[in-house]
Amino acid sequence: MIEVEGLTKYYGDFPAIEDLTFKVNKGEILGFLGPNGAGKTTTMRILSGYMPPSAGVARVSGYDVFKQSLEARRHIGYMPENVPLYGEMRVAAYLDYMGSLRRVRNRRQRITEVMEKVNITDQADARIATLSKGYRQRVGMAQALLHNPDIVILDEPTIGLDPRQIIDVRRLIRGLQGEHTVILSSHILPEVSEVSTRIVIINHGHIVAVDTPEGLTALLSGGERVHIELRGAPPVEKVVSALKALPSVNKVEPGERAGQFLLLYEQGKDPRPLVARTIVQNDWDLLELHYTTLSLEDIFLQLVVNEEEQPEAA
Amino acid sequence: MRNMWIIARRELGSYFISPIAYIVVAALIALTSNFFSLILFFSREATLRYLFSNLTTIMLFVAPILAMRLLAEEQRSGTIELLLTSPVNDWEVVWGKWLASFILWLFILVLTLIYPFILKVYGSPDWGPIISGYIGLIVVGGTLLAIGVLTSSLTQNQIVAAVLGVVFTIGFWIVGGGSSLLSGPLASVLNYLSLSQHINSFYQGVIDVKNIIYYLSVIFGALYIATRVVEIRRWR
């Protein structure tokens, strides 16, 4: 659904993001996690077709967001950070405007549906300038869902909301799963881990980790892991079952590329000698076997600290 | 094309939500009716020639004010981000904005039809110069508004857009004035470029296709540059 390859963006000489590569599969909710200034908004802006990349390719529903921008944009619903809206317009009129630009069929009915979905029906005739932050956020969400896009891009969807509103927005996002492919950015770890099926961690414009929330939690709670790369991509099931049979190994997962595997094991019982022996016995070619570095934890610490510094209600 | 209309319609709605359109329309009507009665009183001629040329001069200042908000405000508030990530071409955004201000200008001109109507009731005006004069006002107004849209694309600040717009419209208006001091090809080029050199024939009753083409090309040129400015802003 979303394919990003070598995406790079410079502002003058300053690299905002460098060589980002990741994929989002259909129906997934991908969390894009990173501290402020990590390049999240830049990535979202490129994916939404607002801004061209300096290098690299991003494809959305098979369309290049730069070369086939209009086509790609038809498949995207986008909510920018801080939700810019026309304050002088009324909610329903604004949605009608956005809907007509995107050629939404049965527009009136669709607007009613979407307003119900995000729970703003009672504010349909209110001027946007008079709405609270929480309501504005929902109007932004309604606008992004109006044309029933394949892909929904949400940049910091819960920033500045109070805890109850945050829960509402999270519920809303989780409700999108399956129907839409969602990519959302946040600088708050629990935020992302609660709604996402997979998480990309970005820092200083580089991807630091890609994992499921469970994988990250395991890592956080002290679970340890080994990264394995085999040459020639041997059958995945065989490798998984052979490694899983080893004592102290909790979980084996295929990695991002063919031939890569991640192995989770019980703390303090390093299985690397056993793993190496198993691989050699099975006649697979071992390219790499290493224990993941701790820099991730540093970033987590940084993220967690950031969250604690954030006031709960803005 | 359809997107252009959708954008223009929203923009027109915004004009009449904010006080700016009411103020400008009221001020223009007050000024023109004052000029109309004064000119009529002193000249005792059933002509609108002088009124038209006064209205044109006023538009040098008013057009940038009508256009100042169009792109600058979207850029300031960030709403341009949602517009430019909708399946809409950049030129449709720029032309839609211009179209909204142009329709407002046509609306103002319709209100001024009261003056020829008064002339008809109390005299027998020559309709030729009045009709050609209105055609001249339509194109010159459209041109000044296009320049306003261009300066609005250059900044996030409406006041800066308006001031810059007035500098541009007046500069473009008087650039031919220097031609009397110069001679040779430069003088005729400046003379040709000047907005003011192409308008008087309309008020005298002559519709020259060359003059219409001149104004249309300035409109296209200004809006083309504005589109490129919007495009370049995406890159930063």
Image (cartoon, rainbow, N blue to C red):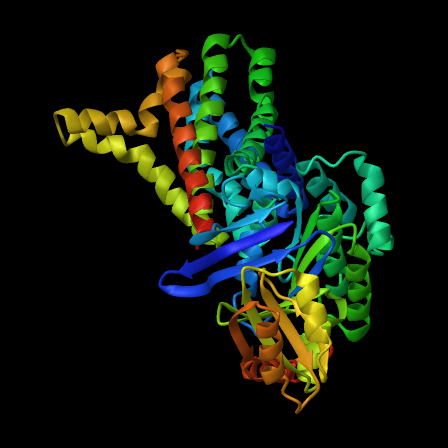
Q: Is residue A232 visible?
A: yes
Residue at the spot 82% in from the left edge and 58% down from the top edge: A175
Please state the horizontal and vertical placement of residue A251, each as a whole percent of the image. Answer: 72, 75
Assign the C terminus of chain A to one quadrant of the image. Answer: bottom right
Please state the horizontal and vertical placement of residue B35, each as a whole percent of the image. Answer: 49, 30
Residue at the spot 70% in from the left edge and 40% down from the top edge: A97
Compared across the picture, whether B115 is left or right of A91 comes to: left
Residue found at the very far bottom of the displayed protein: A268
Give the image quarter of residue A257. Answer: bottom right
Q: Relative to B135, is A269 above or below?
A: below
Please state the horizontal and vertical placement of residue B144, each as a whole percent of the image. Answer: 43, 34
In this view of the protein, which residue sits in the foreground, B20 or B129?
B20
Q: Relative to B214, is B7 above or below?
A: below
In this view of the protein, which residue sits in the foreground, B38 or A86?
A86
Compared across the picture, whether B174 is left or right of A234 comes to: left
In this view of the protein, which residue sits in the foreground, A305 or B52?
A305
So how many labels did they put on this image? 0
Residue at the spot 66% in from the left edge and 67% down from the top edge: A239
Q: Relative to B142, is A259 above or below?
A: below
Compared across the picture, whether A300 is left or right of A203 comes to: right
Q: Is residue A53 visible?
A: no
Please state the horizontal and vertical placement of residue A104, each as a whole percent of the image. Answer: 74, 37
Residue at the spot 43% in from the left edge and 29% down from the top edge: B219
